Image: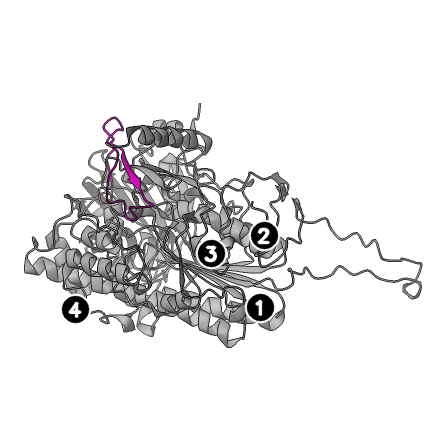
Amino acid sequence: MPTPTSETPFEVHLDHTHLPEPEWDFRNARIGMYATESSPDFPPNKQAPAGAPNILLVLLDDVGFGWSSACGGLVRMPTAERLAGNGLFYNQFHTTALCSPTRAALLTGRNHHSVATGVIAEMATGYPGYCGIIPKGCATFAELLKQAGYTSAWFGKNHNVPDNQTSAAGPFDNWPTYQGFDYFYGFISGETDQFYPSLLSNTDPIEPPAKPGDGYHLTRDLADQCIGWIRQQKSIAPERPFLAYFSTGAAHAPHQPPLDWRGRNEGRFDMGWDKYREQVHAEQIKRGIIPKGTRLTERPEQIPSWDSQPPEHQKLFSRQAENYADFLEHADFETGRIVDAIEGMGELDNTLVIYIIGDNGSSGEGSLVGTPNEIMSLNGRQPSMEESIGFMDRWGLPGTSPHYAVGWAWAGDTPFQWTKQVASHFGGTRNAMIVSWPRQITDTGQMRSQFHHCIDLMPTLMEIVGITEPREVNGFIQRPIEGTSFAYTFANGAGSVPSTHTHQYFEMLGNRAMYADGWIASCRHGRLPWETSGSSGFDEDTWELYNITEDFSQGVDLAAKEPKRLRQLQDLFMAEAAKYNVLPLDDRFAERLDVTLRPSYFHGRDEVTFYPGMTRLPEGSGPKLVGVPFTLTAPVKIERDTEGVIFALGGDAAGFSLFFWEGKPRFHYNFFGIRRYDVVSPEALPAGEHTIELAFTPASPPPGGPADVVLSVNGKEVARGHIDEQVPQRCGTETMDVGMDCVSPVCADYEEKGLFPFTGTIDSVTLRFGDHEPPGGMERLKLATRMD
């Protein structure tokens, strides 16, 4: 933690190395026999430092450097432009190249492997740098600010709760309200449907307040909640500063703009991704966003040119970009509503707004042709062009989970190489950041080009507020903070001051780099960002070398000319990898989605019984029901008109549901919205008690193969069916539910019926497993967790 200088806004006033502070000891109270003979010493309310600013931290999702109009892009983001004009624009700020890792590093001021988040939470494995459990010796900035007198709340995406700890059984010590935040309203996963979100209030699952047809959209809801919370805090305790963390699901897939924002970008991306990059690159140079002479890096040979695509394909690709732009522009608009609300309360002058436009580069996970269902792509199953074109007119509407083609991801990272996941190149790690604080930052509208990283946010906030680095928090010895404050860049004329962040390693899914003093060694590893399965080994990797003091975009590889410098940086990377828990390197992707790779309350159980009221059990914290044989048995009591869901997993992205429809038991299997299968009793059942049984049998062990389904009533088979292709790994970010279908509907037939609750009586739902572990599952678990 750097020592504050005379230019630091506040002198350090706290020297509390052990937090929380000791309880009030009433040492100044005089206690006699009677109150009339005594004098009190009441504990005061905790006070933040005089003049401490409010803090609004905005983090958008999956937005590359070249999309926003504030960065010279074509997506109109007037709030970002306004804040940049009233503050500072940072063009060398870096993330980790992936969601959970960036967010963990941002929260803790430590490198992502140091806080066990070397990959996203759904892919955690049993190694110190990868288990997904943020160590208690790495307190968050929210925890320290709370101890310094702040009130705090988090709105939106949390991707830092271990995947196997997201259920009602907890444990909750990795949830926001146990990591320094007083309030949380949002979702816990990598993504969620914007029309039917898996929504939480603190630790309680809740239903969204409205439906898409009523104008509901998640980003709008999050902004409403954030504004309401800020107003409430300032009405009750106007002198107490707030920390509001506004972390949108936008613009991560599913790319779903509000219904009333659709079509605002029609025709604006017909030039295609190659010419888009040329136009944006020229604008970036013209406006000084990137230095003059910065090369526009070439399109990788693996990405097709725009002109090579037939007109029908180009029409689909244009629609994909239009839809994404609608989505991202709306996120900026809602951010603007929050800023306007703060200004309307007279608080904007002393509010530090940090607007980070993306937690990594643009996402290439949508395949070479784009996908109408990103969950399918993450499962390792890419769509055909015919499948994608079939969704063109519905792209972005409820019931789709779309993602654009890789060509747009590459374009959105202009002028850099590659995309999200690729930590070796700035297309994966370079994100724009804007900082506005009218009371203190007067060098407004200026560029800051110091090299900084998301681990630098926490020490910056600590320096601004005047918090010394604690040795102990909540009884846990703290690990050193690894970031470096960038508060020095707030001073007038600081644009030419050398960066205090002099070296930084990068690693993600085997892609790796080492930056030191203006040079970066880069190694893009094996698997491409849109190839979501397969492991290639590391023996054939090639390293590149760039002098980014002269080559802003990593456009000129100097490895052959500077082998000695390259070797030094490679050796430094290995030293950093050993220091920060980067090893072992692991390039698997979809394979790590398997829930059996992580400890589970359901592991090893041959039988699980759920009861009515068991709803919203996240898939990652539930029993494995994908790719395994199981029998579901449900004793029920019905009337002639009984309808509703007995058991459901997933939603409109993928999943299955067993329900009563027109008096008949019906099983519906949703294969990513691409294909749907039904197994239905031929006859309605009479009123009374019945036992409904579903037997699900995969034809072979490999994930994603065919399966057979048998539906029985009272021990007698009534229907059977065949599924040609199963969901390989996960149905998405939704839940298991007994007696209803929460979040979005698995089957579109009952979409208008809401949760479609079962109107009869369910005694229980029992799941019995055959070979409940997939072949090799336990061995993989042992390997991942080093179990004996």
- Pick whichever, 219 or 762, lies toward us: 219
- Disc 3/disc 2 C-alpha distance (Å): 13 Å
| Nearer the camera: disc 3 or disc 4 | 3
Side of 170 where 646 appears, left or right: left
- Disc 4 residue type? Gly
Q: Which tag, 3 or 2, sits closer to the chain's start?
A: 2
Q: Main secondary structure of the magenta part?
A: loop
- Disc 1 residue type? Gln
Task: Please check the rendered image and state whether residue 741 is part of the magenta-colored stretch, yes or no.
Answer: no
- Residue drawn where x is 89% and y is 58% of the image: 30
Mark 4 = which residue? 267
Quick check: can you spot residue 217? no
**Which portion, as a residue range, is magenta?**
532-559
Mark 1 = which residue? 233
Side of 199 where 179 appears, left or right: right
The 10 Å Cα crowd at callout 4, few under 14, some 14 to 19, many 20 or more, is few
- Disc 1/disc 3 C-alpha distance (Å): 34 Å
- Disc 4/disc 1 C-alpha distance (Å): 44 Å
Mark 2 = which residue? 5
